[in-house]
Amino acid sequence: MQSVDPQNGKNFWKKNSKTVPGNIRAVYGAMHPPILRSPKSSPRKEAGGPRKPESNDSFQDFQESVNDAWDCNDDEFYVISDVKISNRMVQSAALSVINSHRSGQLPATTMAASSLPELHSHLPSQASPTTPSLLPTSQSPSIDHTLHTAPTVLPCSSPSRIPVESALPLSRLDPSAATHNRTPVIHALGSERDAARQEKFLELIESPNTNLPELRKLSWSGIPPAVRAVTWRLLNGYLPANSERREDTMKRKREEYWSFVKQYYHTRLEESYQDTFRQIHIDIPRMFPLVPLFQQTIVQEMFERILYIWAIRHPASGYVQGINDLVTPFFVVFLQEVVPEDKNLDDYEVDQVGEEERNVVEADSYWCMSKLLDGIQDSYTFAQPGIQTKVLQLGELMKRIDANLHQHLDRHEINYLQFSFRWFNNLLMREMPLGCTVRLWDTLHAEQDGFSHFVLYVCAAFLKHFSQNLMAQRDFQGLMLLLQNLPTSNWSNSDISMLVAEAFRLKFIFADAPNHLQAAKK
């Protein structure tokens, strides 16, 4: 909502002062951190003079400043200096800038030859035309550039139904991203090696008492899709290591979840809980807007129940934006377990799955998400202190592993909060394709404290990977556009394997040198 100032006729934001006792509002900045310049002196001046630092600047101030952000689409026109600008014109101009910037980051092989002259005329002079490799060029001369094109889907004809390497959709979360690579990437397996690896997993899983340290070691480099669901349940702590207890435990936990639904779900209509449910109801359709699977009503209702029950049972944090993304990998992996192998999850009609199997997918997704959040609870309590701490630690770590990039970001007044808050809040889910996220979570599950500790080094390796691209940007706008739209839409499992390998190297070097996790004293 907007009001009109009777003195000058200009619009200004009307803040919503309604509060619910004991209710914690969702943090809008969790997925979209503010783009604010640091209060230090800068030659660039904005209208009204440079912004002066205030002693009471804090994360709580930022949270309050955006609590009415959902009302931003109420008006058809923006008013700037008494000149009306169409909302459609603003969106069109913004989309043009983003597409122009992105075109400079995509591999040249993905661009149609007929469109190159037009794209070149809009390219910023700082844009880098290539996508970097995780290794220097001298170390990776044999990179297969065919990874940048959609490969041929190879059906699995083996009677033993050996699974493919990655049957998950690799759709980009960014709705404005290029669409040439939205076809799921499916790789054929080397039958002997991968079948033998799957047998090792089955041997551990089916043993009377699963050796969890050995299972973690085997899972670190990726889990075969056929055994991924049960492996995640074991590593997550939801499924007991003792095979005799598993059936009774899973039956009891699934019945307990549905008893919660029966006990609490009807309360979403009560006034005291309407704000929580409304926020969940708004956020769910925004997940993967270009993937038909997540736009199905039956899927959205499953997510609504999972998130609402979790919020009701965890009043210390309640529902916070970003938690909805953490359900997705579990849901996709457990759904893949009950969907025919030859079906594509991108557009599979979930109502074709039996009700009993859908109930299992929903209940297991809830419990595994709950187990995950138990280890990172401080990331979603009031003001999200766990994430703020990780953001500060990332800055201190980058000072030591890539001082030039750190100074470059500081020189252009880029604050780590402005881009990495979303990384930690969503565990990088919005920075890479979904299939890559699932592969990354294989390693995070395999690492002790992977989601609470190792993810810091993954984010550092992720930022370091794009160091060359970022150093090529020469202004604040170019850096922020690149940081919020990193060129990962062509990434595959091999890119994730190299990313986590670099993260492990950084952890090995710096984890026992805790000074990099402390703020500079001077």
Image (tube, rainbow, N blue to C red):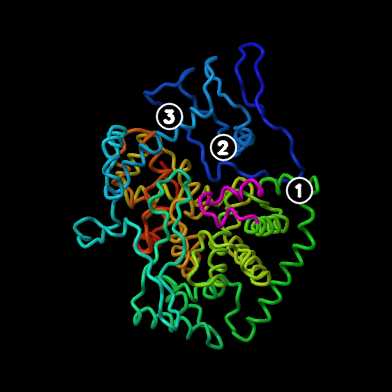
Residue 451 is situated, as x and y percent measured from the top left of the image, at: 51, 61
For residue 235, which numbered disc appears in the image?
A: none
Q: Say which element carries label 2.
A: loop
Give the alpha-carbon distance from disc 3 to disc 1, as whole Å. 42 Å
Q: Find the magenta span and give its range.
A: 280-297
Q: Quadrant of the N terminus?
A: top right
Name which residue lies at 48% across and 60% down.
453
Furthest residue toward top: 7
Name which residue lies at 39% across and 26% down.
42
Residue type at mark 1: give it: Tyr
Name which residue lies at 46% across and 81% down.
201
Q: Quadrant of residue 14?
A: top right
Q: Say which element carries label 1.
A: helix
Question: Of callouts 3 and 1, which one flags the residue occurring earlier in the amino acid sequence?
Answer: 3
Residue type at mark 3: give it: Lys
| Residue indicated by mark 1 | 273
| Horizontal arrangement in the rendering, residue 515 relative to residue 247 (left or right) | left
Name which residue lies at 43% across and 60% down.
184
| Residue indicated by mark 3 | 40
Q: Nearer the viewer, residue 211 or 85?
A: 85
Q: Are marks 1 and 2 in contact (CB under 8 Å)?
A: no
Residue type at mark 2: give it: Ser
Magenta run includes residue 458: no
Residue 167 is situated, as x and y percent measured from the top left of the image, at: 45, 67
**In this view, 224 is above or below 505:** below
Characterize the magenta stretch by its predominant secondary structure: helix
Residue 53 is situated, as x and y percent measured from the top left of the image, at: 50, 28
Q: Say which element carries label 3.
A: loop
| Residue indicated by mark 2 | 58
Give the alpha-carbon distance from disc 3 to disc 2, as whole Å. 16 Å
